[in-house]
């Protein structure tokens, strides 16, 4: 796996989670082109099932993909079927919702 994709760099933690959670580079190319590189301390990117379905990437009708990004660095990524908790947990984060 490459350590850089589009304008984003992958941390070692993300590389492991990418492998562990079956998030391949082709999937990232289809998603990350819609993600803004902001100057925020932390971005929480929610990729909704409707977007994943349109791109042929959906696991099911309920599971979304979540990325935690700091500027152009991807810290982690995971599948989640209940992302609402992030709005309470990540109070100072900037949210990007891709639908």
Image: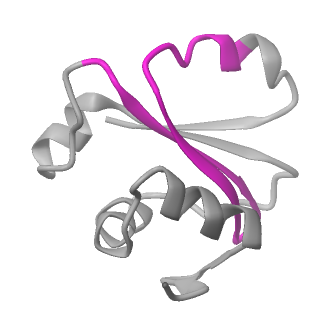
Q: Is residue 77 left or right of residue 58?
A: right
Q: Which residues are magenta?
A: 62-87
The relative height of residue 7 versus residue 57 in the rendered view (above or below) is below
The relative height of residue 52 versus residue 8 in the rendered view (above or below) is above
Residue 85 lies in the magenta stretch: yes
Q: Residue at x 62, y 70 (%)?
A: 15
Quarter-wise, where is residue 64 in the image? Answer: top left
Quarter-wise, where is residue 96 in the image? Answer: top right
Q: Residue at x 47, y 50 (%)?
A: 21
Q: How is the image coloured?
A: one colour
Residue 58 lies in the magenta stretch: no
Q: Quadrant of the C terminus?
A: top left
Q: Is residue 18 left or right of residue 14?
A: left
Q: Residue at x 71, y 46 (%)?
A: 43
The relative height of residue 1 versus residue 97 in the rendered view (above or below) is below
Percent x, y of residue 22: 39, 56
Task: In the displayed orientation, state which residue is furthest to the front.
Answer: 20
Percent x, y of residue 45: 56, 43
Camera-side residue: 15 or 41?
A: 15
Camera-side residue: 33 or 17?
A: 17
The relative height of residue 72 versus residue 7 in the rendered view (above or below) is above
Camera-side residue: 43 or 78?
A: 78
Percent x, y of residue 4: 58, 86
Q: Is residue 52 left or right of residue 16?
A: left
Exactly how many numbered labels are in the figure? 0
Q: Residue at x 48, y 83 (%)?
A: 6
Percent x, y of residue 71: 76, 65
Quarter-wise, where is residue 14 in the image? Answer: bottom right
């Amino acid at each position: 796996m490459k350590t850089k994709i589009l304008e984003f760099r992958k941390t070692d933690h993300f590389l492991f989670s990418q492998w562990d959670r079956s998030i391949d580079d082709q999937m990232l190319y289809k998603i990350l082109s819609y993600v803004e590189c902001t100057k925020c301390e932390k971005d929480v990117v929610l990729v909704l099932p409707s977007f994943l379905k349109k791109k042929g990437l959906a696991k099911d009708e309920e599971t979304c993909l979540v990325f935690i990004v700091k500027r152009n660095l991807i810290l982690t990524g995971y599948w989640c079927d209940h992302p609402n908790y992030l709005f309470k947990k990540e109070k100072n984060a900037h949210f990007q919702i891709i639908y």
